[in-house]
Amino acid sequence: MLSQQVQFYTWWNTQKFIAEEAPLANNIVVRLFAKADTFRIETDAEGASTMHLGFIGDNGTTYGVVSYNAGVLEYSYDGGSSWNIISGLSAADFYTVADTLQFKLTGPYGGEITYAAAPAL
């Protein structure tokens, strides 16, 4: 009986991530990416990836970074302020396939969701 309750709890939290939390993160990242004029993906020595966005405006180019660190997907811009997009993740991976950005978010109970977007230019 206890085993069934633990399995149900795990399933429930996996579904909660996929149905509620991941779409909110997607909404924010897609809005950022839709306004970006360019992007690039960087991967560090430990395999962690970050997405760098460039925005061309009247005052020149500004930059933003979407990064994953210690369970938090975060956005920072021009080396200044930053804010959390979503927390409690197990992993976040950014990569490109045929000039299309793809990012995969993994929730705390293993639920995964993958998104794809193309740059504005």
Image (tube, rainbow, N blue to C red):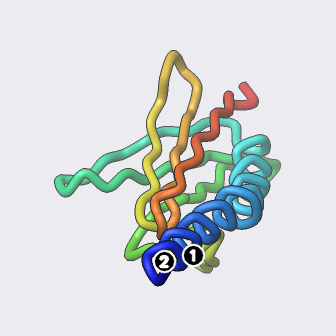
Q: Which residue is mark 2?
A: 6
- Above or below, comparing residue 52 to residue 19 in the picture: above
Picture quadrant where residue 22 is located: bottom right
Seen from the viewer's position, the closer of residues 38 and 16 is 16
Residue 6, horizontal then vertical, whole percent: 48, 77
Tell me the distance, in whole angstroms, between the alpha carbons under discs 2 and 1.
5 Å
Residue at left 69%, top 61%? 25
Mark sitting on residue 24: none
Seen from the viewer's position, the closer of residues 46 and 92 is 92
Give SS at disc 1: helix
Q: Amino acid at mark 2?
A: Val
Q: Which residue is mark 1?
A: 9
Q: Amino acid at mark 1?
A: Tyr
Mark 2 surroundings within 10 Å by alpha-carbon count, few (fewer than 14), some (14 through 19), many (20 or more): few
Residue 29, horizontal then vertical, whole percent: 69, 53
Numbered-mark total: 2
Pointer 2 with pointer 1, Cβ within 8 A = yes
Picture quadrant where residue 16 is located: bottom right
The quadrant the C terminus occupies is top right
Q: Residue furthest left?
A: 45
Residue 81, horizontal then vertical, whole percent: 61, 79
Seen from the viewer's position, the closer of residues 61 and 14 is 14
Residue at left 25%, top 51%? 47
Mark 1 surroundings within 10 Å by alpha-carbon count, few (fewer than 14), some (14 through 19), many (20 or more): few
